[in-house]
Amino acid sequence: MSDSVPRLELLRFLRRVQQQQLQQTDRWIAQEEQRAAAAARAERTRPPKDPGFVVSHGIGEDSRPFEVHVGDCRMAKRTKPVPPIEARRLLTENVEACQFCRPDSELGMLE
């Protein structure tokens, strides 16, 4: 079969295939560079790891605070963000600490 096709024609065919493969590799490289750039942007815009603290409030007219949580606690409902000093004050005023995320431990109030 190779005797019927001139060698020069086979080499030109090989060159076209290699060019196509190189173009595909270049596209993959460009896609990976875009992914890396997007990941770097996401890392720069990611919120800080320490989410702070939140306070859960009751419903209706009696919407007093009833529980303090670490900011990313999944048990927290109807919350308002508070700074650490406010979270400490609420915990000393008989507002409960969440039993799951333990904000009192996070704030260094337990030994």
Image (cartoon, rainbow, N blue to C red):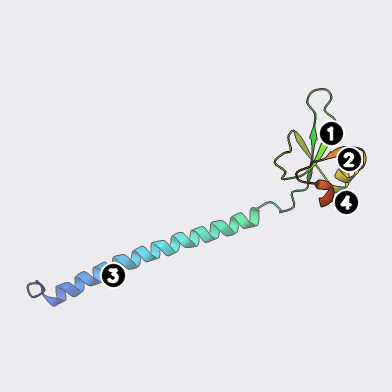
> Mark 2 or mark 1: which comes first in sequence?
1
**Residue located beneath label 2 in the image:** 90
Vertically, is 78 above or below 16? Answer: above
Q: Distance between the residues labelled 3 and 4?
A: 67 Å
Q: Is label 3 or label 1 in front? A: 1
Rendered residue at 62%/57% (across/down): 43
Residue 105 versus residue 36: which sits nearer the camera?
105
Q: Is label 2 or label 4 in front? A: 4
> Mark 2 or mark 4: which comes first in sequence?
2
Instruction: Give SS at disc 4.
Output: loop
**Residue located beneath label 3 in the image:** 18
> Is there CB contact under 8 Å for labels 2 and 4?
no
Instruction: Give SS at disc 2.
Output: helix
Q: Distance between the residues labelled 2 and 1?
A: 8 Å
- Position of residue 15 in the picture relative to residue 28 (left or right): left
Q: Where is residue 37 in the image (x, y as percent from the top left)?
A: 54, 60
Label 4 environment density (alpha carbons within 10 Å; few <14, some 14–19, many ≥20): few
> Mark 2 or mark 3: which comes first in sequence?
3
**Residue located beneath label 4 in the image:** 110
Q: Where is residue 111 in the image (x, y as percent from the top left)?
A: 88, 54
Residue 80 versus residue 67: which sits nearer the camera?
67
Rendered residue at 26%/67% (across/down): 17
Q: Distance between the residues labelled 3 and 1?
A: 69 Å
